[in-house]
Amino acid sequence: MTMKIVSIKKVSFFIVPLITLLGIYSLTMNKPRLSSFKQNSVHAVSLAGAETSMNFKIVDEKTIMINNIPSIVKKEYIKSLSSTEVPPGAPSGDYLMLETSAYIFAMKQSGGNTYIGLVKDLINEGEGHIWWKI
């Protein structure tokens, strides 16, 4: 009888930490980060079909360039956006939100594409709702 108790203790000694590590890994590795979007400057076209375009580049962990103007990312967090909050053609789900001193951007990689949305213009205190697909 004591052999079973000892073996259960030994098994749980290895299994519980393994499950904990896998849980932490799945929570942290599946979340988008700014570094996962790192790329050279790209030309993006508006999802609205208009001629609105931009050049977008991630310089480092805290700096992005939009149309060759650097912006420091002050706050970075994950927010779930529903299909009513994104334009047609953009997927709903978890978006990486980037707050700079002037704008709030939403970014998501899906299906080999990157979607970038100007969610809010902080200078003019208006909603942006301009979305691009790379």
Image (cartoon, rainbow, N blue to C red):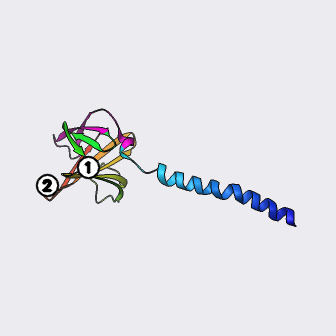
| The label number, if any, that marks residue 31 in the structure image | none
Relative vertical location of residue 4 with respect to residue 116 in this rendering, above or below: below
Q: Which residue is pictured at 32% across the width and 58% down the height?
A: 83
Q: Is residue 81 left or right of residue 121?
A: right
The extreme left residue here reads: 124
Q: Quadrant of the N terminus?
A: bottom right
The image quadrant that residue 15 belongs to is: bottom right
Q: CA distance from mark 2 to mark 1?
A: 16 Å
Dot 2 crowding, Cα within 10 Å, few <14, some 14–19, many 20+: few
Residue matched to label 2: 123
Q: Which residues are magenta?
A: 35-59
- Where is residue 88? Give x, y as percent: 28, 51
Q: Which residue is pictured at 81% across the width and 62% down the height?
A: 6
| The label number, if any, that marks residue 117 in the structure image | 1
- Taking depth in this image into account, of 128 and 12 the one nearest to the observer is 12
- Where is residue 28? Give x, y as percent: 47, 52
The extreme bottom residue here reads: 1
- Where is residue 94? Give x, y as percent: 38, 55
Q: Quadrant of the C terminus?
A: top left
Instruction: Give the amino acid type for the residue marked by disc 2 in the picture.
Output: Ile
